[in-house]
Image (cartoon, grey):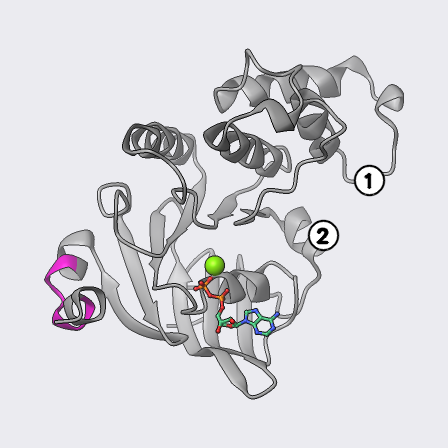
Amino acid sequence: YGPDDGLLVLQNVTKRFGGLTAVDDLSFAVEEGEILGFIGPNGAGKSTTFNCVTGVYPPTAGTVHYDGEDVTGTAAHGMVKRGLARTFQSFRPLEDRSVLDNVALALTPDRLFSLSGFRGGLREQARAICERVGLGDRTELSPSELPHAGLLRLELARALATDPDLLLIDEPFAGLSGGEVEDVSGLLTELREEGLTLVVVDHNMRGLLSLIDRAIVIRFGSKLASGTPEEIRANEEVQEAYLGG
Ligand code: ADP
Ligand code: MG
């Protein structure tokens, strides 16, 4: 497939750290409007793939196209401006700001501005986003007062504050209970219905196959399988990799 065959298209992306090849000649496309699962065991290269796409560092080789444009090596703020947002596996809220302020600060492209300089409109927008992710009654708390699932919602809110078209979510289900996985899956499904394209990363398939339209499974930085949840479930190589059988 070519660079126009998806909203985000990776072609032959490789990332090396010294002698270690974390991502190895990986190609796949994210289609507009889908929820794509990006699955692989710990250390398979999932976060590194995201980091190459979102401008944390450039790939060692290969190309990344976004909306038909070559964005290989584009810095993080450039990717955010184009409409690509991400959440991190480890949450990084500003601990000395309220939940609302954390979201309001993500709304502005220049985080150096003080909150006192904001017009009411931004706080209203931030409040609406907090309500959207289920934090409407906790806007005045400190992030440190939120449980793990609340911090994930805050991380999603901060990503939504950049008004993305494509949202990459790194391991949202880690540390969540079964009920919380269902709640977050429901939220992600709603976001997709509102027009967002989503990539959801996970190291296992728990809760994921019921959420996604399609999945890419990687191992040792390379693609092991891709297809619908049914195809992934039935794939013998995937079964061997996950069940050791
Ligand atoms: P995953 O997200 O699938 O668990 P990662 O992408 O975090 O895997 O890591 C893939 C491999 O790359 C691992 O072996 C990891 O130790 C290595 N790695 C990741 N980031 C770095 C880095 N900044 N420097 C060196 N090695 C790294
Ligand atoms: Mg990771």
Asked if disc 2 and disc 1 are in contact, CB closer than 8 Å, the reply is: no
Quarter the N terminus occupies = bottom left
Quarter the C terminus occupies = bottom left
Task: Determine if residue 69 is in view.
Answer: no
The residue sitting at 50% across, 35% down in the picture is: 152
Left or right: residue 108 compared with residue 23? right
Majority secondary structure in the magenta region: helix
Q: Position of residue 199 (x, y in %)?
A: 42, 50
Q: Which residue lies furthest to the top in this view?
A: 137
Instruction: Please state which amino acid type lies under the numbered disc 1.
Output: Asp
Check if residue 237 falls in the magenta segment: yes
* Residue range of the region highlighted in magenta in the rendering: 233-238
Give the structural element (helix, strand or loop) at label 2.
Answer: helix
Q: Provide the residue designation for mark 2.
A: 77
Q: How crowded is mark 1: few (under 14 residues within 10 Å), some or many (20 or more)?
A: few
Left or right: residue 184 compared with residue 242? right
Left or right: residue 206 compared with residue 65? left
Q: Which of marks 2 and 1 is nearer the N terminus?
A: 2
Task: Determine if residue 91 is in view.
Answer: yes
Instruction: Indicate if the residue with disc 2 has its beta carbon within 8 Å of ligand 1.
Output: no
Q: Provide the residue designation for mark 1.
A: 110
Instruction: Please state which amino acid type lies under the numbered disc 2.
Output: His
Give the structural element (helix, strand or loop) at label 1.
Answer: loop
Q: Where is residue 9 in the image (x, y as percent from the top left)?
A: 46, 65
